[in-house]
Amino acid sequence: MKSPLNLFYFISTLTPLFFTFFLVFLSAMNQDWKVFFYILGLGISAFATFSLANKYTTEIHPNRSYTCDVFNSMLPFNIPGERPNFDIVSMFYTILYVFIMPASNVEEWPNLYLFTVFTVLSITNIFLNWKNKCSSNLHGILLSALLGIFLGGGWFLVILWTTNSANTLYFTESSGKEVCSRPTNNTFKFKVYKNGHVIGTM
């Protein structure tokens, strides 16, 4: 029987894949197009990672684990070398695009529980990337993180400016305080009738 730690490591390894499917499910339930813009940005991030990896080719560690290519195997092209690492790029892209950038547009932090879970899984994923020799040096991990931050923040601003609507982005809806606000006091005037004649007002 596998230990709970091994199960946690397995889930962490598949964090980018699980979270993408979660956002697809969330958009399907809410019947919105938010996941379309998220996946489009993720595709651009994959292409940027592929372009940089081909331009600055790095050698693969001889002890590299097969788990390093779980997410990459779903792409239409192979990302060579250790850096940038698309797992790390995609996670930082998600953190910026889905959580941190929307937080700058609303008064309350968006879905703190989900953000905490995803962050813990992402940190574990980065540790496993280093442990399994997917990114065997700090330079590659840092480069991948910076690329993900740049792409996530940049894509958020592009969508916000081009659509001019926060409804195309995650966790940017109104907090609902306007709906719950107290209505203003109104004064009404009534006329009192008796036998068809006005006998007074109030």
Image (tube, rainbow, N blue to C red):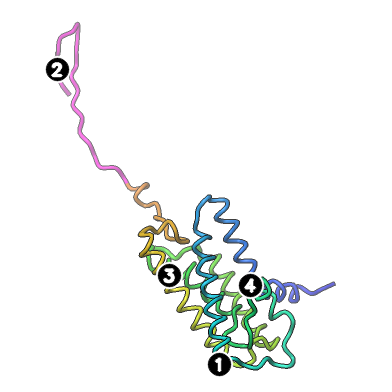
| Circle on res. 200 | 2
Please name the amino acid that badge 4 sits on. Answer: Leu
Label 2: which secondary element: strand
Q: Position of residue 20 (x, y in %)?
A: 60, 65
Residue underneath mark 1: 139
User: Of circles 2 and 3, which is in front?
Assistant: 3
Please name the amino acid that badge 2 sits on. Answer: Gly
Q: Position of residue 55 (x, y in %)?
A: 54, 89
| Circle on res. 201 | none
Q: Pick whichever of labels 3 and 4 is earlier in the sequence.
A: 4
Closest to the observer, 118 or 84: 84
Where residue 50 sits, quadrant-wise, is: bottom right
User: Of circles 2 and 4, which is in front?
Assistant: 4
Give the class, few, some or many, for how many residues have Cα within 10 Å of label 4's Cα (few <14, many ≥20): few
Closest to the observer, 72 or 150: 72
| Circle on res. 75 | 4
Q: Residue at x 14, y 13 (%)?
A: 199
Please name the amino acid that badge 3 sits on. Answer: Met
User: Of circles 3 and 4, which is in front?
Assistant: 4
Q: Which quadrant holds the C terminus? A: top left
Residue underneath mark 3: 101
The magenta stretch spans which residues? Answer: 182-202
Instruction: Tell whether position 134 is magenta.
Output: no
Q: Position of residue 111 (x, y in %)?
A: 50, 63
Closest to the observer, 156 or 49: 49
Distance (Cα) linking label 3 and label 4: 26 Å
Distance (Cα) linking label 1 and label 2: 86 Å
User: Of circles 1 and 3, which is in front?
Assistant: 1
Please name the amino acid that badge 1 sits on. Answer: His
